[in-house]
Amino acid sequence: MKSHTHIALLTLTLCATTALPAQAQAATDTHLVTDTHLEGQLPSGAAYLMDVPADWNGTVLLYSHGYRAAGWPNPAQNAPDSDTGGGTTARLLAEGYALIGSSYATTGWAVTDAVPDQLATLDLFTQKFGPARRTLAWGTSYGGFVTTTLAERHADRLDGSLSMCGLVQGGVANWNNTLDPVFALKSLLAPDADIPLTGFADQSSAVAASNALTAKVAAAQQTPAGRARIALAAALHNIPGHNDPAQTEPGPTDWDAQQVNQYAAVTGLLRLPAFSWRQEAETRAGGNPSWNTGVDYTAMLGRSPLYKEVTELYKEAGVSLREDLSTLDQAPRVSADPAAVRWMRDTSAFTGRLTDPQLNIHTTGDALIPVQAENAYRRAATAAGADPLLRQGYVDGPGHCAFTPGEMLGALHTLEHRLDTGRWDTSPAALNSRAQQEDPTTPGRYLAYRPTSYPRPYDLAHPGDARP
């Protein structure tokens, strides 16, 4: 375990709702007399949660949870699930791992709270239980973004990291590419409507814009031309045609069924991320951090793995794809607020500079954070010279963060294998073998896969990205 530098922060009074057993207070740093469960509050107001088994193996897992919008419940979380009947929490505790995590002091795009709260939780753990032999950061979705931020900016606190279904394209790229499909929808389906896409004064104005565009999209879904245009918008965000485990998987050329599945994901994008969540992020950034000035949507569509579907649906509808792309080229573009871009860049863009091993895993059918996000982080790590420290694994399945417990724990043990041996062993066969060891009843679904390029990458390893 690397040296700790932040313990002084925790000389402040900390309130625990469950008292630490006296036996544990007198325990050594590698073996506790009894299982310990702690809940409490950090000085920031964030809640924390710690579970330490009696036979602690010396490894602490710092878990970062996913995005929680304003008004949502915000409990502390220290593992991807809290299933005491055999999920990740129960299995990890049975294997001797200490599990810790916080709620973050605020909800929304809370990276400036999440990172210090996670470090403070680690400090508190060290204060109470002593230094860990090994500290690993891991997280899901937005928590994968927090995990990678910790890995790049606070590597001295960690030995390795695991980002699962993570927003590893970073904040600037995320909000830019979230703009692209709604820009296409408005330009093609509601060109004369007064529907703002950025710069919302408050949540009510964001919700009103969301409702207005959602209604236009719902009407368009009733016609072949409208469905083709919705598929075009989905392609600009790389929304796959099978993106939810509840959906029937379409055939490889069943364009109509694929579009129906994409429509469901597009409406979800309109309902929350593209408007409501954007407004909250804009408030933090002090303005709009996104732009599409200078973007070539014809080229972007050409790079999308959904290009064939779009062309076939346009042909079926009898409308001109070339004319619609020309409409996008000529539509008024969105400019960013420079100060907001700087805030998002300074808090939420990645350098790719890893100094410890990181493993990322992603489902291939993710609509919320498309799998191409992994290509964006690979691009940054390669430019920064950290490519040997990064490995990525891909699970063949639909849905966001739709991993089995075995697939997540198999990935965790793969990261540990790298730390133990100095060698990566991330072949699909190795990942599936470890997944099945953790969950013999469910075969692992890792496969050989290489995502296409992210539509609009932005990282600090490429200075040319910084020009809106």
Image (cartoon, rainbow, N blue to C red):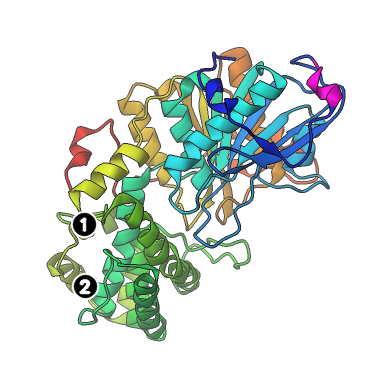
Image height of 45 relative to 71, above or below: above
On screen, residue 124 versus residue 369, left or right, reads right
As rendered, which of 268 and 298 lies closer to the eye? 268
Image height of 32 relative to 245, above or below: above
Read off the residue under disc 1.
Answer: 292
The residue at 28%/81% (across/down) is 318
Please say if the residues under marks 1 and 2 sit with CB atoms less than 8 Å apart: no
Instruction: Please report the bounds of the magenta region as a residue range.
Output: 22-27
Give, as a three-letter code, the residue at label 2. Answer: Asp
Give, as a three-letter code, the residue at label 1. Answer: Asn
**Which mark lies nearer to you, 1 or 2?**
1
Q: Specify the principal SS of the magenta part.
A: helix
Q: Which mark is residue 324?
A: 2
Give the class, few, some or many, for how many residues have Cα within 10 Å of label 2's Cα (few <14, many ≥20): some
Q: Residue 443 appears at what percent x and percent y?
A: 72, 44
The residue at 14%/54% (across/down) is 294
Asked whether the viewer can see residue 289, the reply is: yes
For the view shown, which residue lies furthest in the front direction?
A: 13
**Total number of numbered discs in the rendering:** 2
Give the class, few, some or many, for how many residues have Cα within 10 Å of label 1's Cα (few <14, many ≥20): some
Q: Which mark is residue 73?
A: none
On screen, residue 217 versus residue 63, left or right, reads left
Mark closest to the chain's N terminus, 1 or 2: 1
